[in-house]
Amino acid sequence: MRILLLLFLAFPLLLFSQKRKNQKDTSAIISQSGRIEFEVERDRSDFFVVQGETDGILVIEEIAGATLNGSGTWKLHLVDTAFNLIWTREEVVPADGNLLGYDYFGGKFYLLYSKSRYRSEELVVVEMAADSDENSIYEISTVFPVSISHFESVGETLLIGGYANFRPVVITYSINDKKPRVVPGFYDNKNDMLDIVVDKESKFFTVILSERMRNKKYTVRVKTFTEKGDLIQDNLLNPGEKKSLLDGASTTFANGLQYLAGTHSKKSPLFSQGFYLSKFINGAQQFNKYYSFADLNNFFNHLKPRRENRIKNRIERKKEKGKVKKFNYRLLVHKILRRDDHYVMIAEAYYPRYSYGNTGTFGPYGSTGTFRNNTYRGFQPYNPDFLGYKYTHAVVVGFDSNCNIIWDHTFKIEDKQSFSLQENVMVTGAGDKIVLTYLEENEIRSKVVYNNEIVEGRTFNPVKLAFESDELKTKDPRIEGVERWYGNTLFAYGVQNIKNENGVAGKVHRKVFYLNKIQFNVNREVN
């Protein structure tokens, strides 16, 4: 009876919650102009998507099970910008091989597979042209086992980044010569690979590393190479005696100019206390500028007004005494974007959650791996008490050519949780207007800002279904997201169970993997 009583008491609250949800504002700037579905059958498992700019979207569908000759089948679908299905192909790979990464460059899609789950040095790359039926297969041997964390394509070269014996390694593979080459200067137990950034115009690539210094603090090293892997510049940031740089994101190397941004701390390697911005010209560090979270105007805007005001009052009282109020946050830093005459950095705040006695505690944590930077980062030590990462808000910072912060905004993240660290919020826009979006609970949640102004506050657009009589029954929160595509266009993807009493293709119930085309018009008038 106690359980039933609780359910009855909760029922009015659920109705009230539903009523509030129906009253959420929808965006006047964002529209959904297309949708395509792929049926999910019982013997099929995972879907992956690769955006190919104006050449479309490649949908990778893994079919569970193996053929008699020990091979596995993957279905590949190419969708054009009008959301028409251009072609479907089947690709046969070793049955126990895994998809390790994917990328797109210059009209071609690249898929990286392992030949065997037991031999990580044996790899297979499938190259597909978007405008023809031609496929090329490249078999790559790295000689030694590599745990792959990054896969990129640049020109006629494939880049493979990862770890060998727990030390970072970068390998280039020339498509013309069919030869792999280990890029020198990485095999060091003091370094950890943070990212690989490719400039598709110059065909240069930049490797960002975290490096431990003699004083046991950390800094960031940035190395830029030609397509063939020849070193152009090697920059080591000097953080000063009392600072540790926890991570870093970089612009591409353009005419000798390069910017870096990330988070800094004094003691903890897990918690940051603010942002740093750095400028390099022809490999020479010009300066580092440090900002605490208290320096930002809107860092705490995701909180309820009363709590935000209490925090701001504490900050002001500290300032009156000539001190800076310190805050500790875990932040996942994204890549830097160029927007007209300034740059934009974005980071997402999160914290790990644990069950039982460990709830809310901090420290070493487990993870079940993640697809990030188009590659799968392998399994971390399993922790049975680990409940996942909870995301609270995204921080967006605009800075000028002298690394002065000119505006900042926050974007509240609700209901988002994952067992692996992943980028959730996509940053796009036109001119100085920035569009922030993420997908959760079958809603495209967005916010539009212009410098210090909010053009459109947080809005909630339900993912548009294919037919008016469709009814969404369930969805899979593990398989959904929003990705940049081209121009002012993004796409949403996910898995849904849909009911249609009228029947679609003779079915009342259908389970689908969907793509929804999202476009934004920042010049549209907002009510």
Image (spheres, grey):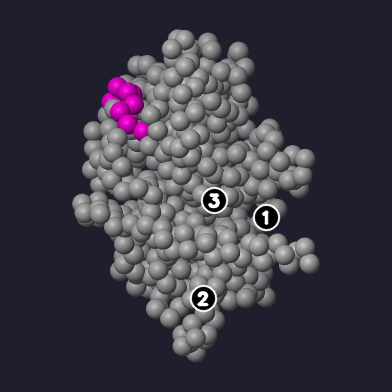
- Give the amino acid type for the residue marked by disc 2 in the picture: Ile
Residue at 50% in and 72% down: 472
Q: Nearer the viewer, residue 221 or 347?
A: 347
Comparing labels 3 and 1, the label whose residue is closer to the camera: 3
Q: Which residue is mark 2?
A: 498
- Name which residue type carries label 3: Lys
Residue depicted at x 52% and y 60%: 17
Q: Residues within 10 Å of mark 3 (few under 14, many from 20)?
A: some
Query: What's the amino acid at mark 1?
Result: Arg
Residue 233 at what x, y percent from top left?
A: 39, 25
The C terminus - image quarter: bottom left
Quadrant location of the N terminus in the rendered image = bottom right
Q: Secondary structure at mark 3?
A: loop
Q: Quadrant of residue 470?
A: bottom left
Which dot, 1 or 2, sits closer to the camera? 2
Specify start and end residues of the magenta stretch as a single range.
Answer: 401-408
Q: Earlier in the sequence, mark 1 or mark 2?
A: 1
Identify which residue, 311 or 236, lies in the foreground. Answer: 311
Nearer to us in this view, 301 or 9? 9
Residue that mark 1 sits on: 117
Please provide percent x and percent y for residue 380: 68, 43
Residue at 68 percent across and 65 percent down: it is 7
Left or right: residue 319 versus residue 478 is left
Is 444 located above or below residue 92 in the figure? above
